[in-house]
């Protein structure tokens, strides 16, 4: 369908359920990044990478998202911190980086 990419963008969880392997989520997110690299997709990709155990890649993605969409950083930093509160092992480093980026942005 002509609208299939838009459905994937709006609701990727329809195509890749939470129980799906992490790399399936990463692959879908990478496709979305090429199709429509919106703020939501860019920041969500960082979280998906962290959830897949790819912390270094997740931090690099977060830095790119913050460079391109700095006005959205506070919203996504809060979301990442909530993820870290639930699953520190996966998201703690990403939350620390999000806070550092937000502090640096606010210091300007």
Image (cartoon, rainbow, N blue to C red):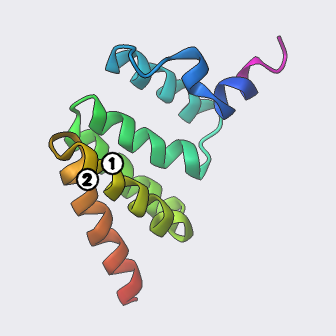
Q: CA distance from mark 2 to mark 1?
A: 5 Å
Does the residue at mark 2 contact the one at mark 1 (Cβ under 8 Å)? yes
Q: Position of residue 46 (x, y in %)?
A: 38, 43
Magenta stretch: give its range: 1-5
Indicate the quadrant containing the N terminus: top left, top right, bottom left or bottom right.
top right
Does 41 appear above or below 94?
above
**Residue pictured at 15% horizontal, 42% vertical:** 89
Mark 1 = which residue?
83
76 sits left or right of 37 in the view: left
Does 67 appear above or below 65?
below
Asked if the magenta segment contains residue 55, the reply would be no
- The label on residue 43 is none
Furthest toward the bottom, the residue is 108
49 sits left or right of 9 in the view: left
39 sits left or right of 25 in the view: right
Mark 2 = which residue?
85
Residue 64 placement: quadrant: bottom left
Q: Position of residue 108 (x, y in %)?
A: 40, 89
Judging from the image, what secondary structure is the residue with disc 1 in? helix
Q: Main secondary structure of the magenta part?
A: loop
């Amino acid at each position: 369908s002509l609208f299939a990419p838009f459905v994937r963008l709006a609701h990727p969880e329809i195509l890749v359920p939470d129980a799906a392997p992490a790399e399936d989520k990463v692959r879908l997110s990478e496709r979305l990044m090429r199709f429509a690299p919106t703020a939501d997709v860019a920041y969500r990709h960082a979280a998906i990478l962290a959830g897949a155990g790819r912390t270094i890649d997740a931090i690099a993605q977060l830095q790119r998202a913050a460079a391109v969409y700095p006005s959205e950083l506070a919203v996504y930093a809060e979301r990442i911190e909530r993820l870290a509160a639930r699953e520190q092992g996966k998201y703690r480093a990403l939350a620390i980086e999000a806070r550092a980026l937000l502090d640096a942005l606010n210091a300007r």
